Image (cartoon, rainbow, N blue to C red):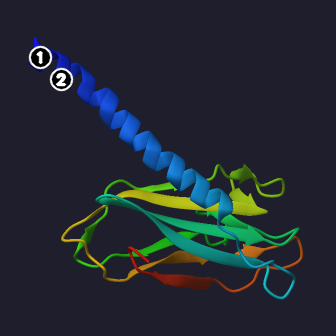
Amino acid sequence: MRVLLLLLLLPVLSAKAQSTFDKKIEAAARTLSCALPDEREPVTLNAMLVNEKDSIAVIVKAALAPGWHIYQYVPQNLPYIPIDHVLQLPKSITAVGGWIKTDPASSANDPGVLIYENEAVFIHKALRIENNGKDTIVAGLYYQTCNLRQCLPPVEKTFNLVPGK
């Protein structure tokens, strides 16, 4: 009977522990700020880590100047370059799962194209730290940004993040 009760409670306890971590990630993503973008630099990024026990989450946030956008999805017949997430992990950290992304919007000018305007948040959670690794994580985005008049060349912006700092 005790074993059955334990088996029934395990998913509930796991979900509760995960939701605590999720709340911590959500709060961090909300408070993470980016430099103010402008016409000279229409996209600004910032990144941080959220640690909890043996788990870690990488948060990358983009702020976009009014009228500018970056691409989440582009059909093959169009020349735009969609974002590519940069995540380089040391051997002491193992990635589990994929990126969780802000919902993109449909482009008003290009059917089938999905874009981000104003702000976007990208989270890669459930990274396991083995041996309390303190090695550097490199995270960021490779992206192209456009407005109605022009597209800028693609850019890669990365951050060196250290767990526990």
- Circle 1 residue: 2
Q: Vertically, is 159 above or below 108?
A: below
Residue 35 in the image, given as x and y percentages of width and height: 75, 79
* Contact flag, marks 2 and 1 (Cβ < 8 Å): yes
Secondary element type, mark 1: helix
Given residues 34 and 9, the one toward you in this image is 9
Q: Identify which amino acid the numbered label 2 is placed on.
A: Leu
- Residue 89 appears in the picture as rendered: yes
Split into 4 quadrants, where in the image is the N terminus? top left
- Determine whether, in the image, residue 5 is placed left or right of residue 146: left
Name the element at disc 2.
helix
Residue at 65% across, 67% down: 32
Task: Residue 54: give its label.
Answer: none
Residue at (88% x, 68% y) in the render: 66
Q: Residues within 10 Å of mark 2 (few under 14, many from 20)?
A: few
Res. 72 image quadrant: bottom right
Q: Amino acid at mark 1?
A: Arg
Q: Quadrant of the C terminus?
A: bottom left
- Residue 151, horizontal then vertical, whole percent: 77, 79
Q: Quadrant of residue 121?
A: bottom right
Quarter residue 144 falls in? bottom right
How far is disc 2 from disc 1 in space, using C-alphas? 6 Å
Q: Nearer the viewer, residue 133 or 63?
A: 133
Using the image, determine if residue 36 lies above or below residue 111: below
Residue at horizontal 77%, vertical 57%? Answer: 110
User: Could you say where residue 15 lies in the image, as x and y percent from the top left?
Assistant: 37, 34
- In the rendered image, is residue 74 in sight? no
Q: Nearer the viewer, residue 131 or 92?
A: 131
Name the residue carrying label 2: 6
